[in-house]
């Protein structure tokens, strides 16, 4: 089994899905990602298919071991056992938090992917990009290949130094090699040049400009693994990513839960919905940089409906409300969604759901009931 291991602050789930989509075209490929959107079975996939519920329960029981084991460790071990028993050729593994101490860092990967590193989980990872990047770079193994998104220079210095220590070959995406020639809420068509070869008319079903970079990083990883161009094209085209600038009519759903991700969401909204009245349904976890997050949301919101999508970790709606100049608080997420959707319809605008994957999950579940 060959492992591709991903760490970063944003985009690692999407990039992992693109890589797995490509590898699944001609090989048996397992994918381990987090968080899940609707069901925890989504965290473990082979060939794009979630682990069946009965098998999920069986493998979780096998992996549980010590009764006080952290749930993410159990998920990780269950996925690795399932992949092993199904003899997958590739396993694409996304870290949960950080990298150096992450439960996934047991995999002997020969390729690591570093997605954009920014500020998040600072209480655990450190309060500077240098400290955070050091934790992320903990997944880099000796004599491996490291593929990186473009990074802030402070983070890139740490990445270069880590690769030098481990004698790892570093490849950094050249965003100048990307040419997008068609974009819309249904997807984007683009060309990308890597190692002197121009890949023309690639297509992804994603609206966010950042997803093109994610797809190109996946392409680089696939090329370095020796995957043929036809499988790369099909893998990118077939990959569908939920809750990342997902457009459902006049509703945009994004799990963006840190300032960098919300800035990317803002760029996507400006590109496709400029001038539209915007109602935002928001929920934020207690341990986040709430001031920075709400400041970003306020840049594209005409009004905000605050809610709480996770009672254990979520900030209560009435505590989130004062961060916005024009907001209301509705603690129950279902009632908040119904009210926010009605308000957006009344204003003739769009509804943007953001701030938490828990909230994105809740809204997608509600929409599936309406379908």
Image: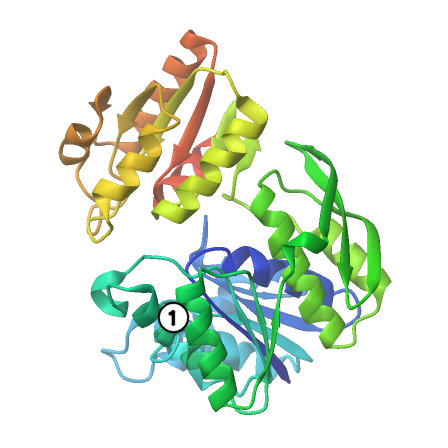
Left or right: 53, with 220 as reference point: left
Disc tally is 1
Q: Position of residue 51 (x, y in %)?
A: 56, 64
The residue tagged 1 is 133
Left or right: 184, with 318 as reference point: right
| Residue 322 in view | yes
Q: Residue at coordinates 44% horizontally, 58% vertically from top-left?
A: 40
Q: Position of residue 127 (x, y in %)?
A: 24, 63
Q: Residue at coordinates 42% horizontally, 61% vertically from top-left?
A: 117
Quarter of the rendering occupied by the C terminus: top right
The foreground one among 211 and 41 is 211
Q: Residue at coordinates 71% horizontally, 63% vertically from top-left?
A: 219
Q: Position of residue 210 (x, y in %)?
A: 57, 47
Q: Position of residue 170 (x, y in %)?
A: 59, 77
Left or right: 218, with 81 as reference point: right
When the figure is inspected, residue 365 is found, relative to residue 126, above or below; the finding is above
Q: Circle 1 — which element?
A: helix
When the figure is inspected, residue 323 is found, relative to residue 275, above or below; the finding is below
Left or right: 329, with 164 as reference point: left
């Amino acid at each position: 089994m060959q492992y591709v291991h991903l760490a970063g602050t944003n985009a690692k789930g999407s990039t992992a899905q693109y890589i797995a989509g490509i590898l699944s075209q001609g090989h048996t490929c397992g994918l381990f990602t987090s968080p899940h959107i609707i069901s925890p079975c989504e965290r473990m996939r082979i060939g794009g298919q979630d682990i069946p519920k009965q098998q999920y329960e069986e493998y979780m029981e096998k992996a549980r071991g010590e009764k006080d084991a952290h749930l993410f460790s159990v998920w990780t071990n269950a996925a690795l056992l399932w992949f092993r028993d199904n003899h997958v050729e590739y396993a694409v593994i996304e870290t949960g938090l950080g990298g150096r101490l992450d439960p996934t860092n047991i995999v002997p990967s020969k390729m690591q992917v570093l997605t954009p590193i920014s500020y998040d989980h600072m209480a655990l990872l450190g309060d500077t990009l240098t400290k955070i990047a050091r934790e992320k770079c903990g997944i880099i193994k000796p004599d491996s290949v490291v593929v990186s998104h473009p990074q802030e220079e402070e983070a890139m210095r740490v990445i270069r130094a880590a690769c030098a220590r481990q004698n790892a070959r570093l490849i950094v995406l050249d965003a100048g090699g990307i040419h997008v020639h068609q974009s819309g809420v249904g997807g984007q068509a683009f060309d990308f040049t890597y190692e002197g070869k121009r890949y023309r008319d690639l297509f992804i079903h994603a609206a966010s400009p950042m997803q093109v970079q994610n797809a190109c990083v996946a392409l680089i990883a696939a090329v370095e693994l020796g995957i043929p161009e036809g499988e790369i094209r099909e893998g990118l085209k077939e990959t569908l990513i939920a809750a990342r600038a997902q457009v459902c009519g006049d509703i945009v759903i994004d799990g963006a839960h840190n300032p960098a991700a919300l800035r990317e969401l803002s760029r996507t909204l400006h590109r496709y919905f400029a001038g539209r009245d915007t109602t935002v349904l928001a929920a934020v976890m207690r341990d986040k940089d709430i001031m920075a997050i709400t400041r970003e949301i306020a840049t594209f919101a005409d009004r905000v409906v605050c809610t709480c999508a996770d009672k254990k970790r979520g900030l209560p709606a009435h505590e989130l409300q004062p961060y916005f100049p024009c907001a209301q608080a509705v603690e129950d997420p279902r009632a908040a969604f119904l009210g926010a959707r009605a308000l957006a319809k009344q204003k003739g605008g769009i509804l943007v759901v953001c701030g938490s994957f828990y909230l994105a999950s809740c809204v997608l579940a509600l929409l599936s009931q309406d379908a």
